[in-house]
Image: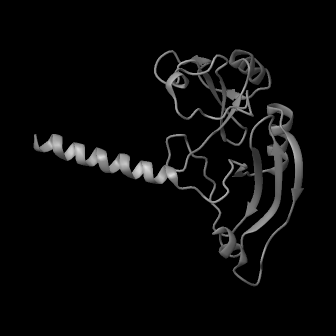
Amino acid sequence: MKYAIQAAILAASLFGAMGAASADSIPGMRGHDHTGITVPDMKQAVDFFTTVVGCKKAMAFGPFADDKGTFMQDLLGVDPKAVIEEITLVRCGYGSNIELFKYTAPDQKDLTPKNSDIGGFHIAFYVDDVAAAKAYLDAKGVKTRMGPLPVKEGPAAGQTILYFQAPWGLQLEAISYPDGMAYEKDAETVLWSPKDPAK
C-alpha cells in the first residue's frame, strides 16, 4: 500500500510537471530550422548530400575566427582559437535544412558516435519506398545496415526503416510510413511529416 501511494504521488508530480512544461515555449517558436553537423571534409560531405542523398546546396560562407579574443568561445562554446573554415547549408526536399561545418581547433576530437552513445544522433530522410532506397544506396556503395525493417507492432507500426552511413561515419536513416503509423489513430499530437508538410 505504501509503495502504491508513493507511486501515485510520483506519477502525479511527473504528469503535473509534464503538463506545465508542455504549456511553455520559446516565444515565437515555429519549428526545427536546421541540424548542424561538423564534418571532416567539406567537399566530401557536400558531394555526399547532393549527389547521393539528393539535397541541394543553398549557400556557403566563412571562414570565421578570432585570433586575438574569445569571440568563438563566447558565441559557440568552442576553443577560443577554433576556426570555422566553411559553413555550407543544404536543403533536403520537404524538411529542415542541414548545416555542415568544417572546423579546426587546438582541442578538436575526432568522434563518430554510435546511436547508443550519449550525444549520438542520426538524420532520417522520408522516402516513398525503403527497398528502392536500399537498392539505390547499395548501388552507390553506401554502407547500409539490416533492412528494410517493417515495424508491425506498437505505436510505430506502419513504418519501415533502414539505417545507413555517410563515408565519414555519420548515421542516417531512410524511413517510410505511407499509410501512417498506429499511434495516429488516437493521438492528440501527430508528428510532422515531410510527406504532408502542411499538416
Q: Is residue 184 above or below residue 82?
A: above
* Residue 12 image position (x, y, % from top left): 30, 46
- Please tell me in which quadrant of the rendered image residue 178 appears: top right
Q: How is the image coloured?
A: one colour
Q: Residue furthest left?
A: 1
* Residue 175 image position (x, y, % from top left): 65, 26
Q: Residue furthest bottom?
A: 68
Q: Is residue 189 above or below residue 87?
A: above
Using the image as rendered, state which of residue 190 and residue 96 is in the foreground: 190
Using the image as rendered, state which of residue 111 and residue 161 is in the foreground: 161
Give the residue displayed 50% in from the left and 49% down from the top.
Answer: 22
Give the residue displayed 71% in from the left and 37% down from the top.
Answer: 166
* Residue 14 image position (x, y, % from top left): 35, 48
Give the residue displayed 82% in from the left and 45% down from the top.
Answer: 90
Quadrant in which the C terminus appears:
top right
Q: Is residue 87 above or below residue 163?
A: below
Give the residue displayed 57% in from the left and 18% down from the top.
Answer: 158
- The answer to whether residue 118 is left or right of residue 34 is left
* Residue 121 image position (x, y, % from top left): 59, 44
Quadrant in which the N terminus appears:
top left
- Please tell me in which quadrant of the rendered image residue 53 appears: top right
